[in-house]
Image: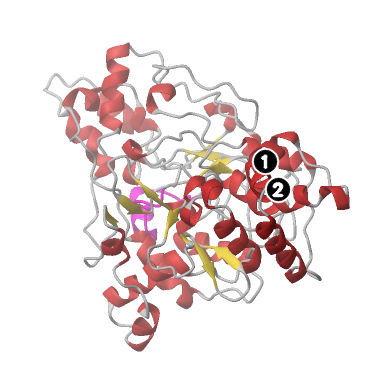
Amino acid sequence: MLLLLSCAEPGPATLSRELEGSLDSGFVETRLADTGEPRDWLAEAEAPFVKSPDSAEGLVNTSADLDELLEGLDGACEAWRADRSDREKELRCGKSMFFYETFGTAGVPTALTDFMLHGFPDQVGPGFSELGLIQDPTSAKGYPLGLSDQGNGVAFTCASCHFGQLPDGRYSVGAPNHSYEYGRHNLVLAVTLLSAMSGLTGAEIHPDAQAVVQPLLDELAGDIGLQWQLVGVLISLLGQEVPSFSVENQGFYANWKSGTMDFLIEPLPVDDGVHTVSKISALWDIPTDEEATSAGMRDAMLGHTGNTGSTMEFVALFGVVGGEGQPWSEAELAPLVHYLESLEAPEPREAPAEEGARVFVEAGCLECHSGPAGSGLGLYEFEEIGTDDAIAAWMDPDLDGAACCGFEDEVPITNAVKSPRLVGLWAMDRFLHNGSVDSLEQLLCLEPRPERRSPESSSGHRYGCELPEVDRRALVEFLEAH
């Protein structure tokens, strides 16, 4: 039984711990200088947020109607392969891949998935909705969007983590699904069976993991029919490799906040030997290679450590890390890459206000957020930002600058942190790279931050906390207006 879900942004790039000249030394000073003339605060603050021309070719990527959003994707890639010159067909194929393509990644046995999904509707909900996933209205088996059965078991797709429901009720492609209980989902699929058989096998279960699956075990104990179904599932799994799942790691899974995870830890196929935590990232307004170059960036710097140079590298590495077959070529991945690069953050509730724009400029936010969509132009040492530095050892437990686990050639390491894009923040409730902060109010010290230990501590990035409260609230409004 194999479980795999990658919801972060891994991938190759070249190490950069400084701004690498991407911010001209006089840039901030010149913009903030008092010329004696009236300042156009909105123009200055909005410069990073200027939208590129719409490239979505009319596809519906945000809607309160799931049927409208899914817009009949059956056969989309076949239609594109028959006419590769049609960009709309290419994007529709990419959209189909986003929702349904697993890229050969290792999956959960179909019999186990179906047993959990249909045997415990009160505990896991339709389409695992009690765990934060969204049921696919087109799935005959009641699967959620983000799970796809392509013959090698039920595996995860981009939509499991990067498709969510916004606070206003709309669904949006590219939205970070911060409601997704990734840790609990994996425990339901793996530890329920381990615990149910512990009397026979002697398997040890972490008490926090036991608490997660106990409602399912209680249901199982009172339903003889379910017990016989379980026997059938176990018979179907005979001869399959069961990956190890240590008690310590069970405890980690049980305590991750929704919308956060470590996707390089057992029982997943790759374990980098270090416990790190990453929040699910938004896929809105990813800079293209051309946009990154124009902005003076080394590359798109995707991923929390900025190690993914482009959307193509990000997508390709998903299959490399979790795939069991041949890696996909760039030509095969192109529809998904171009589709992802067409996604824009949904319109927010309010337009940017002058006062918040003034604070954004005067407080120096542009020093780290002057790139496309408010992203940074370079990488930073963790000591400079002060945030939890556990992720510096991501895929590099020895902190020697080289990837572990057989990926030395595929995954360069930065041991650094990037400043993220600042679009769609109004729809999010996980902030900092590890998701340890639950709101912009907490980030700007208007409310207490949660107290958790590394790798989930909420330390660092106290920029703006020294401002007067009225300025911090104006800054929150400005940030939520993009």
Residue that lies at the very extreme toward the top in this rendered image: 468
The answer to whether residue 431 is seen in the rendering is yes
Residue under the image location 38 percent in, 55 percent down: 293
In the depicted structure, whether residue 316 falls above or below residue 278: below
Label 2 sits on a secondary structure element that is: helix
Pick the front one: 123 or 414: 123
Residue at numbered disc 2:
221
Question: Which comes sooner in the sequence, label 2 or label 1?
Answer: 1
Q: Which residues are magenta?
A: 282-302
The scheme the figure's colours follow is: secondary structure
Query: Where is residue 321 shown, x and y percent of the image?
Result: 64, 62
Residue 310 located left or right of residue 374: right
In the depicted structure, whether residue 202 falls above or below residue 434: below
Q: Amino acid at mark 2?
A: Ala
Residue at numbered disc 1:
214
Quadrant in which residue 362 is drawn? top left
Question: In which quadrant is the C terminus drawn?
Answer: top left
Nearer the camera: disc 2 or disc 1: 2
